[in-house]
Image (tube, rainbow, N blue to C red):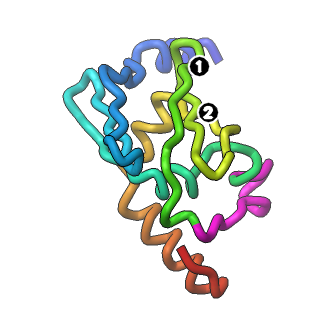
Amino acid sequence: MAEEAAATAGAAAPWPTELRVDKEKRNLLVLFDDGSSHDFSAEFLRVVSPSAEVQGHSPEQRVTVPGKKTVRIARLDPVGNYAVRIVFDDGHDTGLYSWSYLKELGETRESRWQAYIEELAQKGLTR
């Protein structure tokens, strides 16, 4: 266990240098201190919300969220120095997006989006 903690301590956590919502409030750009940047649609962020409402308490409880094609970002609320709460104009505000989760989303966005689109189709739902 001590080795695990030491290995984790040696890895630098991602740190955002800027979070920028576009004027239409449909996209969030996140710039990280390693030089990477990720541009997320509000729809994508809403349907992959880390909230229990969307993710459930186990993979079997995860919910496919339809009908969010026109959702917008109402505001960003900082949470300590480790995350941001994204408040959406549909009232959803319970997901805390940690810096590491945002980084992971950026690195896996394409595959997550494709899986989401396929889930919608399988369940007869629409964006």
The kind of residue tagged 1 is Val
Residue situated furthest front in the rendering = 23
Q: Residue at x 53, y 73 (%)?
A: 127
Which secondary structure lies at badge 1?
strand
Q: Is residue 9 magenta?
A: no
Give the CA separation, mark 1 to mark 2. 8 Å
Name above or below for residue 37 compared with residue 14.
below
Residue 38, quarter of picture: top left
Name above or below for residue 29 compared with residue 99.
below
Q: Which residue is mark 1?
A: 79
Which residues are drawn in magenta?
55-67
The label shown at residue 96 is 2
Q: Position of residue 60 (x, y in %)?
A: 77, 63
Q: Is residue 9 left or right of residue 59?
A: left
Residue 3, quarter of picture: top right
* Most foreground residue, 65 or 1: 65
Residue 87 in sight in this render: yes
Name above or below for residue 87 compared with residue 83.
below
Q: Residue at x 56, y 52 (%)?
A: 46
- The residue carrying pointer 2 sits among few (fewer than 14), some (14 to 19) or many (20 or more) residues within 10 Å by Cα, namely some
**Do labels 1 and 2 touch, CB within 8 Å?**
yes
Residue 79, quarter of picture: top right
- Mark 1 or 2, nearer chain start: 1
Q: Position of residue 56 (x, y in %)?
A: 77, 52
